[in-house]
Image: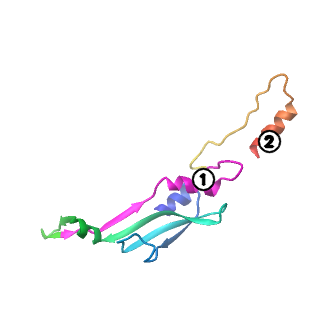
Amino acid sequence: MYANIYEELLACPVVRGRKSEDERFAGAIDTATVELYVPVSGRGIQGATSHHLGQNFSKMFNVMFEDENSERQHCHQTSWGISTRSIGAMIMIHSDNKGLVLPPKVAQNQFVIIPIMKSSDDPKVLKAKAEEIAA
């Protein structure tokens, strides 16, 4: 699901993976992740994670349910997280020193520069400035 958000909506390619035992969330049995590459810095950034917590936290906090045999069981839990970091990652991946660039599904309406001239303006200078801004 996270990969689809990044790839289909934010137009950011990701690498799907699993965290090593040393990298995963403390107490988690398994952690899945999507990682992104930021071309401007040459670095990666963690996009989102999902953790399989098993019964570790339900046993710690005594979170239980009653099963079909009316026996109390500790819950198997997961933890999912995607945040505003996704917006920052999208900006870092698509933007450059010329400004913010947003993918079509995020900003469906792109901008158009319409020069508005006064009678004293030189049309060639105004056109050149509009082209400079658009570049």
Q: Is residue 7 left or right of residue 96?
A: left
| Residue 60, picture quadrant | bottom left
Mark 2 Cα shell of 10 Å, populated few (<14), some (14-19), many (≥20): few
Q: Is residue 38 left or right of residue 27?
A: right
Which residue in the structure is indicated by mark 1? 91
Residue 12 seen: yes
| Residue 63, picture quadrant | bottom left
Residue 17 falls within the magenta-colored stretch? no
Return the residue found at the far left. Answer: 70
Q: CA distance from mark 1 to mark 2?
A: 23 Å
Which residue in the structure is indicated by mark 2? 131
Residue shown at 61%/66% (left/top)?
43
Residue shown at 60%/53% (left/top)?
91
Residue stretch rendered in magenta on the structure: 73-102
Say what amino acid the circle numbered 1 marks.
Answer: Ile
Mark seen at residue 110: none
Residue shown at 82%/36% (left/top)?
127
Q: Nearer the viewer, mark 1 or mark 2?
A: 1
Most foreground residue, 118 or 21: 21
Residue 10 seen: no
Colour scheme in use: rainbow
